[in-house]
Image (cartoon, rainbow, N blue to C red):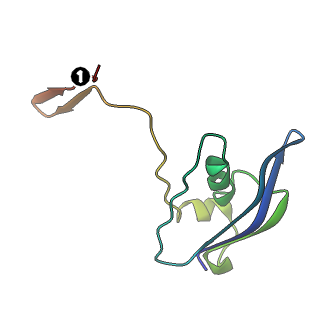
Amino acid sequence: MLIDANHLQLTLERRTILEDVSLHLERGEIYGLLGPNGAGKSTTIAILLGLHTPRAGRLSLFDGEDSDPRKMRLRIGVMPELESLYLRLTTPGEAVGLEAAP
């Protein structure tokens, strides 16, 4: 299994940030995390990338092939939502201006 996360829990500064999150992803699947602000999407990704260590639960990536978080980060692609719009795009010798909608 590509991602096998069971009952993950994360506590930071005595505050439960993530509670009982499970995620199972097979090789070849594409998965999106959707939810309101504060739902734990970014925190879940941070745990998968080894940026946070869960207080409870079990996590296995890539069938347990390697547990080094630095190596895991090279194999995981993340496309975060960006709240920005480039107001001025340029190409060699050409400028394209965009205006924000009212």
| Neighbour tally class for label 1: few under 14, some 14-19, many 20 plus, Cα within 10 Å | few
Q: In this figure, which residue is indicated by the disc labeled 1?
A: 99
Question: Between residues 33 and 51, which one lies in front from this camera angle?
Answer: 33
Quick one: SS at disc 1? loop
- Residue found at the far top of this picture: 102
Question: Between residues 6 and 102, which one lies in front from this camera angle?
Answer: 102
Q: Determine the image quadrant of residue 63.
A: bottom right
Residue 45, x across and y down, in percent? 62, 54
* Left or right of residue 15, residue 23 in this image: left
Residue found at x 65% / y 60%:
48
* Left or right of residue 90, residue 48 in this image: right
Q: Is residue 91 above or below residue 67?
A: above
* Left or right of residue 53, residue 23 in this image: left
Q: Quadrant of the C terminus?
A: top left
* Left or right of residue 35, residue 18 in this image: right
Q: Quadrant of the N terminus?
A: bottom right
Q: Determine the image quadrant of residue 89.
A: top left
Residue found at x 28% / y 23%:
100
Residue found at x 80% / y 57%:
9
Q: Is residue 75 above or below residue 98?
A: below
| Amino acid type assigned to the residue bearing label 1 in the image | Glu
Q: Is residue 53 above or below residue 66?
A: above
Residue 75, x across and y down, in percent? 52, 65
Residue found at x 87% / y 38%:
13
